[in-house]
Image (cartoon, rainbow, N blue to C red):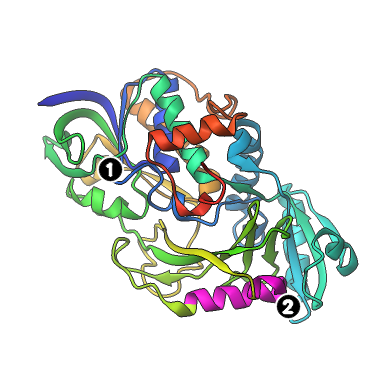
Amino acid sequence: MTDGTTVLVVGGGATGVGIARDLTLRGVDVTLAERGGLGSGTSGRSHGLLHSGARYAEADAVGAEECIEENEVLRSIGGACVRDTGGLFVQLSEDDPEYFEEKRAACEKIGIETERLDAEAARREVPDLSERIERAMWVPDAVIYPSRLVAANAADAENHGATIHPHAPLTDLIVRDAGIVNAHLGGTVDETIEPTYVVNAAGAWAGEVASLAGLDVSMAPSRGVMVSVDYDRAGPVLNRCRDPDDGDIVVPHESEAVLGTTSVPVSDPDNYETADWEVERSIEECAAMLPPVGDAPVVRKWWGVRPLYAPDEGKGDRRGISRGFFCLDHTEDGVGNITSVVGGKLTTYRQMAEAATDQVCEKLGVDAGCETASRQLPGADDPDRLDEFVARYDGQGPTDEDVVG
């Protein structure tokens, strides 16, 4: 059996469902295919930090600007998908004080609100902070519950006419006359569909999807561990105020704290080593900021794979690769009806989706503007309804397992 669709979105993480939502709100017929439940890739295996942009301010001003813009948008549309905790960048006695000042100045230049706190004031916010703390800087970080965020986007897309397939891996793309004419979906669907246009939003797996159409998308994925411990006194997100390194973020949940993370290059996002040293180092380094987490019981641990795009930087340490995003039009590569959306962060998923949707609509001749920044997600103010969406799309991930459902 062969069905038609205007746009096939491959990938059911935050970016993919964000694209599906944006397209349907602009009146475009959409089918979305994910292989293993929505959010089962990078989105649902993150640390769940809603970046203020401060982490990137001095090294990547554009990326930081994207973060603070989307931080404010997601707070307004996300409801119970977001927990507003605030964040602290903490400087310990062994950390470079000039780095602290550079970051604060960069934040102010970009427009990221900050407030300097001395050690005593910082401990009033987080009494368990290390005695080695010298000072801290408040920033508007927060927490995302990605399972809810992904499912709410999917529900809104479906409410506006999209077809969502949570268990339908893409198994083949047929290219003819410089365009994709057929796509075969396996799993619960097991059908061939005829898309007018295809959006590759498969994250770390974007290279594999592109290769089915004979295209080369040079991903450079890296793995990182997250460790959730039994600890409910973190308060704000904690960031170590130093050059990004292993174990420099603590993300608070209701009764747990997520510690992370590492950055180790991988060649295959489905098949990679997971090492005990990553867990041990993340706990040790986070405990330098917040000593009680060093002895707190480990509730669960998981690894995620970052969808880094680096056509010229595929080897070596990948911390320096841009967290910006790219919308790749493959017309010049010989396939005119596919866009690959690569890179980016969970915080900027909606902005990535808007940029990709703009590109697709231009190709399709659709003259309609983006509405996703101003329309609240369905169920945003009802956690139980959000969790029903998660169950509908088999979307539970380890990041927010202690909160969702």
In the rendered structure, which segment of residues is drawn in magenta?
278-294
Rendered image: mark on residue 330? 1
Nearest the viewer among 300 and 327 is 300
- Is 171 displayed left or right of 84 in the figure? left
Amino acid type at mark 1: His
Asked if residue 395 lies in the magenta stretch, the reply is no
Distance in Å between CA atoms under marks 1 and 2: 45 Å
Which class describes the residues within 10 Å of circle 2: few (<14), some (14-19), or many (20+)? some
Q: Secondary structure at mark 2?
A: loop
Q: Is the magenta region chiefly helix, strand or loop? A: helix
Can residue 356 be seen here? The reply is no
Asked if residue 292 lies in the magenta stretch, the reply is yes
Identify the residue at horizontal 21%, vertical 37% (top origin). Answer: 188
**Which residue, given by chain and number where applicable, does mark 2 sit on?**
95
Residue 205, given in percent of the width and then of the height, sits at: 31, 53
Nearest the viewer among 268 and 258 is 258
- Is 89 displayed left or right of 184 in the figure? right
Identify the residue at horizontal 17%, vertical 49% (top origin). Answer: 214
- Is 383 displayed left or right of 177 in the figure? right
Amino acid type at mark 2: Asp
Residue 247, given in percent of the width and then of the height, sits at: 59, 71
312, above or below 381, in the image: below
Q: Secondary structure at mark 1?
A: helix
Identify the residue at horizontal 76%, vertical 71% (top origin). Answer: 91
- Is 192 displayed left or right of 120 in the figure? left
